[in-house]
Image: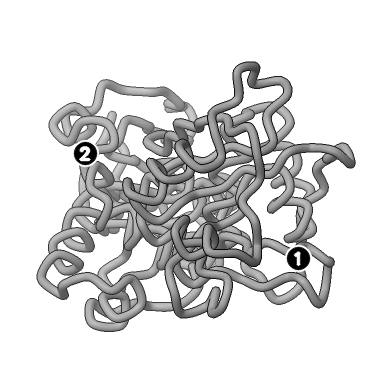
Amino acid sequence: MIEVAGQRFYVESKSVITAARGEQLSRSVEAGTRLLVVADRIAAEAKRWLRESRVNYFDRRGELRIVSPPMIVDTIVKSALAMARGAGGSLDSQVAKEVAISCLLTPDQPHGVRQIARYINRAPSAVSKAMADLRNDGLLTSTGEAMIPDLFYALLAVWRRRAVSLAALPPANSQQSHQLALGLEDPEHAAGWALTDILAAASWGIPIIARGNHPPDFYVPSEAALRRARILLGEASDPTTRACTVALPPARLACLHRVDHSQTTGERWPVANYIVVALDIAQDQARGLEALEQWTPQGIPRAW
């Protein structure tokens, strides 16, 4: 219990407050109880629940709200915690990005180190460190649940795609297919080229307009595959007349566990998982983010 301006508040201190915990707190607080929730990170949806139930909170990243008349405080404060951690530090490495993507694919479930290590094919020790860093930044709960939408937007802030425009499309059936490491035979289990951005978003059902002749955008699995693509397919002299673009992914996972949409949407290229695709289209902060807000897929939990 603490006293602020002559008023006493019960304090609940947590590392993170998820949306579910915020709802629980808002429903359980007794009428007339002055409660102050303090956490390193409070999810945006949790804050909505707390505000509606007149529960006070302090997000140690720098937001303080106390509404207990005659005292009303609703302000952004300088956060020593945020300054000490810096921006995006816990998501600097490829492993951390892959851990984040894995958790965002099933944000409503807990995740263990070995489970994720198997999925992304990384050493458990590297995964353990990445998860610890993300927990310390309040982006994962103690059981490995993703803090949404915080984790998605933190990953978006460090997600960069540096595309190269090519003059020709890769042939699906030829010796070049092997040289280019397309990986068309087993998209789910083998690494290979992964369709992303606009055409991939349309394939996932994200409501974004893609003109009929829009060139595909790919992630390629290695530096070697990128070099061969530039040599064998040629670089486009004018990006507006490109046949496709290729890029090394910010995280290797983008080229793993690809999805075959040929039977459902007719898309012939294996598609990157929907978190990777969402990160790419969200680089357009107007059209892309609007499309994500409008997307309500069945059987896919929203991570933004």
On residue 297, which mark appears?
1
Circle 2 residues within 10 Å: few <14, some 14–19, many ≥20: some
Q: Residue drawn 24% across and 42% down?
A: 92
Mark 2, residue position: 89
Give how far apart the Cα atoms at labels 1 and 2 are. Answer: 31 Å
* 187 relative to 294, above or below: below
Q: Residue furthest right?
A: 212
Q: Residue drawn 52% across and 41% down?
A: 246
Q: Residue furthest front?
A: 175
Amino acid under disc 1? Pro
Left-right relation of 41 to 124: right
Residue 22 visible somewhere in the drawing:
no
Mark 1 vs mark 2: which is more N-terminal? 2
Residue 285 percent location from the top left of the image: 62, 28
Left-right relation of 158 to 24: left
* 260 relative to 290, above or below: below
Residue 9 percent location from the top left of the image: 31, 48
Colour theme: one colour
**Which quadrant of the structure image shows residue 109?**
bottom left
Element marked by disc 1: loop
Left-right relation of 290 to 112: right
Name the residue nearer the viewer: 97 or 268.
268
